[in-house]
Image (tube, coloured by chain):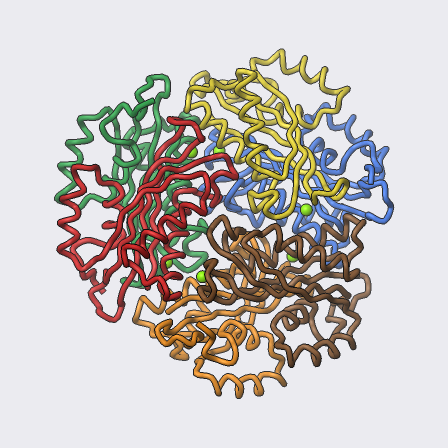
Chain colours: A brown, B orange, C yellow, D blue, E green, F red
Amino acid sequence: MVRQQSIGIGKCALQLVLASSDEIEGLKSEINETTFQYCLGKTGSMDLQKVVSAIETAAKRNHIIEEGLYREMHALYHAILEAVQGVTRGQVQLGDVMRTVGLRFAVVRGKPYENEQEGEWIAVALYGTIGAPIRGLEHETAGLGINHI
Amino acid sequence: MVRQQSIGIGKCALQLVLASSDEIEGLKSEINETTFQYCLGKTGSMDLQKVVSAIETAAKRNHIIEEGLYREMHALYHAILEAVQGVTRGQVQLGDVMRTVGLRFAVVRGKPYENEQEGEWIAVALYGTIGAPIRGLEHETAGLGINHI
Amino acid sequence: MVRQQSIGIGKCALQLVLASSDEIEGLKSEINETTFQYCLGKTGSMDLQKVVSAIETAAKRNHIIEEGLYREMHALYHAILEAVQGVTRGQVQLGDVMRTVGLRFAVVRGKPYENEQEGEWIAVALYGTIGAPIRGLEHETAGLGINHI
Amino acid sequence: MVRQQSIGIGKCALQLVLASSDEIEGLKSEINETTFQYCLGKTGSMDLQKVVSAIETAAKRNHIIEEGLYREMHALYHAILEAVQGVTRGQVQLGDVMRTVGLRFAVVRGKPYENEQEGEWIAVALYGTIGAPIRGLEHETAGLGINHI
Amino acid sequence: MVRQQSIGIGKCALQLVLASSDEIEGLKSEINETTFQYCLGKTGSMDLQKVVSAIETAAKRNHIIEEGLYREMHALYHAILEAVQGVTRGQVQLGDVMRTVGLRFAVVRGKPYENEQEGEWIAVALYGTIGAPIRGLEHETAGLGINHI
Amino acid sequence: MVRQQSIGIGKCALQLVLASSDEIEGLKSEINETTFQYCLGKTGSMDLQKVVSAIETAAKRNHIIEEGLYREMHALYHAILEAVQGVTRGQVQLGDVMRTVGLRFAVVRGKPYENEQEGEWIAVALYGTIGAPIRGLEHETAGLGINHI
Ligand SMILES: [Mg+2]
Ligand SMILES: [Mg+2]
Ligand SMILES: [Mg+2]
Ligand SMILES: [Mg+2]
Ligand SMILES: [Mg+2]
Ligand SMILES: [Mg+2]
């Protein structure tokens, strides 16, 4: 069950959210040599619903998942929630506990395992800042969620 | 409160655990140009206590934190727990819920903020696999914890 | 401490929420032969507060609990929260994590233990669907909470 | 996206664990008229790992899931964890918080949605007792986990 | 629904665990003027089961609760778990996350409400230290759980 | 690493929130003999954000922490969240799960360890009532959070 790709699907997603503006093009070329599909975006809010919604919307608009198929939405949804748990570390809450996030997100879809039958998986990575709703009173945060699709 | 370093302390820790063997030397050179101190290690277990312990021990042995000072141990401990929450996503448990991890970890210490008074902070990053205690039945996982020290 | 009734109080509550329209009358007859009191209802919302409130209100209106007595409200409240944890499985949240529920609920009160001194207990069962706020993008969910009263 | 079956996959799993010995045969006949596959079992322990393991083993032995395929094990694993959260309501722990369970479990696999593309899903239902490790000092508990496979 | 006693049942339990050796006698006299019953003890462990067990055993031996009655054990058990959540703040775990506690505990039983029908309630208070399993590397911790009985 | 003060920083914070109006002056005199700084306040809400905000604002206005320094805000924030977990015992939520709090809070800052290098720490204590949003349908609750600053 060796990985099919030269790079893991989760690592790929994390590198996309961590990449600086001058690293991103090189990274995109690298991913384009794999069979992975991906989308990238930004979201910032005290409202967790908006964060979840921004990632779902981006994945649908970029045809990473098929919007009308619950199976795909369900896979994505749980991957998002798992990534959000890395970001929130304990309480899956933002404004309710007086904090806000500014995040980059990446959704990557593909076949990460050598065995063809393992099929497609999805990775959601988040990276950015979390903190008080006052600029600068914040530190970095990250999360990764992975699911079969 | 602009970041003092060209790279965030959390991003630095995440890049260390994500780096492949041919990327690691370049990354180390890059970090050596910052004022950050760091250590890197590996740990794998069904026993969460061993994971926590391996990171604490590495941070002490590599003089990233001062072992006799509770203040520093406390800062590290909570950063580890936050990183572990990203890895476990929901229940901070491994063997109890029949799963095991194989992780690389990085502990980075330094002054990530421009304002000198913000002092030192610590970042703990984890990246590896989580899954059933059967080789190959696993997917990637990651976590990041950050604390003032 | 053998059960006093031919059917457990929790099983009774679960059967009430699972029953189809043609099963419900037979079930009601069966429960009427026990000493259990019960009420049944429906609630659907993205707002967890409305779910909790709907169950509390139904239990009060149907005289399953005595509204002015905190002791009874407290017993019911914790039974509701426990049932909600089965429905939400991890984060006791709905709209905040972009999901909605459509639930049937049953509250059953009575003496489930043979030993008269064990007194009255309360069971809250929930069954329905949870998912995205789009019709059809949902799967089944259930929960059971039990408390002494 | 109307349900394909006359009965939901989760309701089917819950009915299997709730059925008394004289109800079970009728229920099995009813399920045999659907396209669902299922297995039934019992497990009791203060050790959560044994509970998870008993369900996984039964699902593999009864060919509900394909053991060598991580995709299927992953789907089952998360469905089990979700069902366990209904049973434990808050802390996914048994012996550590001085309690034990005696559970019946059912694993049901099939196509619950009318749209063929929604594919297969898996439901895990649990029902039994939870309480102090002293006979009789226990009340009922239940849980339901559902996942795409 | 004014409090019947000059002091709340939870405050009474907290004061018992906070009292220094020269305060305890005065406090005991004060409580003896109420209708509250109580017991006091100490427990220290990396094993949460031992902490739960020590409190249950003390409450039984001191006849604060009636051991054979599940109703009373259930009320105490949930009050203990609630108090433990204050002590552990997030993960209800000790040794698994490499930490240990040294705690004083108090269990208080009585009628805290003026309305006689509110009946008896139970309070469990915990106070002591939590930290690494190395002497001195610890800070204070506390918790309070309250339940109707 | 013996405590420097005759009273622990957490015990001090708990005593402040527990003190009745005739005890508070004696307690204040006692604390004034230590090197601890503190502030006291009240907050009541169904909205957790307001609770967190009230404590943060009081600590800033009373110069217990330096508002512009993220390091200090971060230490306070995590101490508040830990104290709130004792109050909420499981779900860090109020109105969402249909409950409200009325709390006294104390924030204490100082050097609780004999070893000068352990530096300053912060304690947040909460005590009051939690319950249904109907007067009298409530019981006591408490929490304590401690952090290095
Ligand atoms: Mg997984
Ligand atoms: Mg933080
Ligand atoms: Mg219970
Ligand atoms: Mg789901
Ligand atoms: Mg309560
Ligand atoms: Mg701590």
The location of residue C86, given as percent across then percent down, is: 59, 39
Q: Is residue D41 visible?
A: no
Up/down of D34 relative to D51, above or below: above
Instruction: Tell me which residue sits at (58%, 87%) in the image.
Output: B26
For ligand 2, the image quadrant comes to bottom left
- In front of the other: F101 or D119: F101
- In front of the other: B108 or F21: F21
The location of residue B83, given as percent across then percent down, is: 51, 63
Q: Judge left or right: residue A107 versus residue E80.
A: right
Residue C106: quadrant of the picture:
top right
Up/down of D53 relative to A24, above or below: above
Up/down of C133 relative to E59, above or below: below
Total numbered labels: 0
Instruction: Tell me which residue sits at (44%, 49%) in the image.
Output: E92
Up/down of F77 relative to F70, above or below: above
Q: Quadrant of the N terminus of chain B?
A: bottom left
Instruction: Tell me which residue sits at (74%, 40%) in the image.
Output: D39
- In front of the other: F139 or D14: F139
Residue F59: quadrant of the picture:
bottom left
The location of residue D26, given as percent across then percent down, is: 78, 26
The location of residue D105, given as percent across then percent down, is: 66, 39
- In front of the other: C33 or C17: C17
Q: Is residue C18 visible?
A: yes
Q: Judge left or right: residue F126 versus residue D12.
A: left
Q: Judge left or right: residue F25 versus residue D117.
A: left
Q: Quadrant of the C terminus of chain B?
A: bottom left
